[in-house]
Image (cartoon, rainbow, N blue to C red):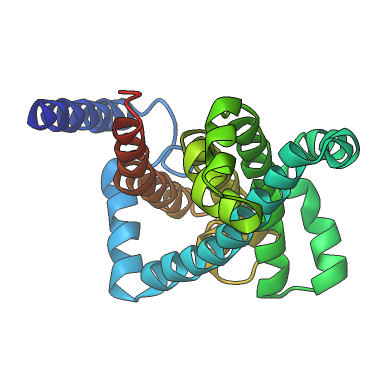
Amino acid sequence: MKKNIIIKKIIFFVILIVIWQIVDVANIWPDNIFPSPYEVGEDLMYGVSDGSLFYGMGTSMWRLAVGLAIAIGGGMVLGIFMARTETINQTIGSLVLGLQSIPSIAWVPLAILWFGLTDAGIIFVTSIGAIFAVTINTYSGVKNIDPNYLAAARNMGAKGNQLIINVLIPAAFPHMISGFKQGWAFAWRGVIGAELLFSFLGLGFLLNVGRQLNDVSEVIAVMLIIMGMGMLIDGFVFKKIEDKIMSRWGLR
């Protein structure tokens, strides 16, 4: 089954590349607007050969990992507090809902003013863009735990941090993993968007370099790398974790 899915995906992307090449041969748009797959491939190979592509990928992934770790840790703590304390939910909870509607890129001016053109500013934008999705899904997961389950845990002596670590978090984890996936998607967009405006290394920086040089093929090449990395992380990390959690909880 998995082999058939992989074959279908390969065929689909090959067809897309063929259509792309046909459109280029038809000269509907000039190459400086719509480059051919070959030109984009050349830019990719050049980025690989001089190491700039790998350095950009590594820099962006480091910022993503740090920002997402902060978002997951902070979001879990805040979400649990909101679910366990009604006063916090009624006050901070409404603020969280409002802040979630702010796009990650809107935090960039504030990050520049607070942190300057540094890694800390990019990590701030990355984490702030993801933390509220994690918070809301953690809150939903904890609130949806069966009260009888919690009562049984208390009767067995679980309380305080022990109740949270050994009961609340495992029981709410199916909801929380959805929050992690959403948070990672927001964080990935946030880190690339921040790098575009900060112009400080990373894949977003390479996008900006392509724009400044009017090199459309470089811009498309970097966009393909961003898309490919996103698909790989989602498919080989979060999808596998989600499937494992859902199977363990009998939800699939």
Which residue is found at the position 80% from the left and 74% from the top?
A: 116
Q: In this rendering, is residue 67 above or below 237?
A: below
Instruction: Decide if residue 108 is on the left or right side of residue 58.
Output: right
Which residue is found at the position 60% from the left and 44% from the top?
A: 186
Locate residue 198, reporting x and y percent: 70, 65
The number of numbered badges drawn on the structure is 0
Instruction: Decide if residue 84 is on the left or right side of residue 178.
Output: right
Residue 85 in sight from this viewpoint: yes
Residue 198 in sight from this viewpoint: no
The answer to which image quadrant residue 252 occupies is: top left
Q: In this rendering, is residue 91 above or below 70?
A: above
Locate residue 200, reporting x and y percent: 63, 71
Which residue is found at the position 43% from the left and 65% from the top?
A: 57
The answer to which image quadrant residue 34 occupies is: top left
Instruction: Decide if residue 144 is on the left or right side of residue 220.
Output: right
Locate residue 54, reporting x and y percent: 37, 69
The answer to which image quadrant residue 37 occupies is: top left
The one nearer the camera, 235 or 87, is 87
Which residue is found at the position 49% from the left and 70% from the top?
A: 59
The one nearer the camera, 24 or 40, is 40
The quarter in which the N terminus is drawn is top left
The one nearer the camera, 44 or 234, is 234
Locate residue 236, reporting x and y percent: 29, 47
